[in-house]
Image (tube, rainbow, N blue to C red):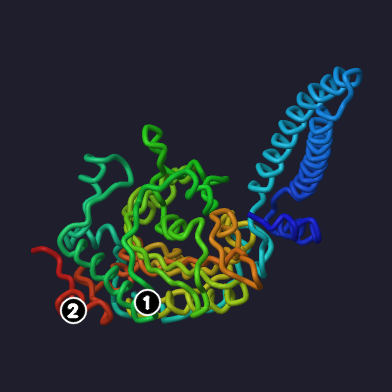
Amino acid sequence: MIDLRALRENPQIARDSQRARGADEALVDQILAADETRRATLTRFEEMRAEQKRVSQSVGKASPEERPAVLARAKELSAAVKEAEAQAGAAGAEADKLLRQLPNLVEGAPEGGEDDYVVLEHVGKIRDFAAEGVERVRDHLELGEGLDAIDTKRGTKVSGARFYYLKGLGARLEMAMLACAQDLALAHGFTPMITPTLVSPQVMSGTGFLGEHSDEIYYLPADDLYLVGTSEVALAGYHADEIVDLSDGPIRYSGYSSCYRREAGSYGKDTRGIIRVHQFNKVEMFSFCRLEDAQEEHKKLLAMEQEMLAKVELPYRVIDVAAGDLGTSAARKFDCEAWLPSQERYMEVTSTSSCTTFQARRLGVRERFEGGTRPVATLNGTLATTRWIVAILENHQLPDGSVRVPAGLRPYLGGLEVLEPKA
């Protein structure tokens, strides 16, 4: 949620942000108008309540002749005060509703939509399979089935489309990758966390996920709980309604969880294999820090993602995501996209977002500051997830269908250097 006082003082920043996102600039003026109505009705309520108090106190001092008129006025004011209070409450609710529709203010992201990203860096060398004498590049599903590591047919039989089993080498590879990510996070001072995968509406809404993409979230109406699509949600809510101590620097967590997404609106996209699925596992970094430190913290999270990608030896590019492709709570986001040989394109494998004070303001996460309190900044970033298996298998495949294990993962696989197909 945006700071309403700052919005009143300089609404043009919010209008510019909305324009950069390709969103409705008029929402800013609707919020300001609703806020003015709220303040006016609140002032009227407070004035009438003060008058009611004065009249009530004068009843005992009134003469017998004056008392009936004073009592009648007190009764009249009582009804009017109740009505004014209701109007103030309704105006406040409307202003809050509109304010919650306003996404975070963009900070430095390129203008435009999904295709208007800016490439910041290319890292690693894309393999020339033809020069190596490889006549046909296998995709991750063919490789995974050859290794008896991925089983989508039985996943569909048991749970429906876009579900799968990881088995044998596939299960070991994912556990190795996630353990490697947690070790890297621990080395950088992050506290490992295994987080809940069901959260309350207050926490889901507080993180900004119940807006335009709410149709992608699984909801359990009998329990009034949501399944998370990332442990970012549970980690953001961990310090809800608390005052945190940032005197020693940011508070950093690395959360492991299973994640669930309905993938609504993605019919026909990446339906083969495990690129776009309904359930996956992930290690997510999350930081609470002072707003002044948010930019440096964002760089740190991106650097850690790149460090992890180096461990699995993937060629990738870093993009500065355009404003129109940012989530509701993000002010800026950097993605790392790994090369996908079978499709000759880049595929997102990590995202790191700075949410400034947007989530913390909604969730009530504050720090002490200049004799009072103020909202903290929150940031998040992917350190490893199931989708990485796609890029690892394809980029490290060998001509016979086996897969070379990246050196960074070998200690987590008992020194295994090559994943061999079943005979």
Q: Could you tell me which quadrant the C terminus lies in?
A: bottom left
Looking at the image, which is closer to me, 45 or 137?
45
- Relative placement, left or right, of 134 versus 50 is left
Left or right of 375 in this view: 304: left
Q: Is 344 situated left or right of 195 in this image?
A: right
* Residue where numbered disc 1 is placed: 308
Residue 43 image position (x, y, % from top left): 81, 42
> Can residue 309 be seen here?
no
Q: Name which residue lies at 43% across and 74% down.
A: 305
Q: Which residue is mark 2?
A: 417
Residue displayed at 46% across by 72% down: 251
Which of disc 1 and disc 2 is earlier in sequence?
1
- Measure the alpha-carbon separation of dots 2 and 1: 18 Å
Residue 244 image point, x, y percent: 50, 67
Q: Say which residue appears at 16% left-offset and 77% top-offset.
A: 416
Three-letter residue code for mark 1: Met
**Between residues 65 and 263, which one lies in front from this camera angle?**
65
* Quadrant including the N terminus: bottom right
Residue 14 picture quarter: bottom right
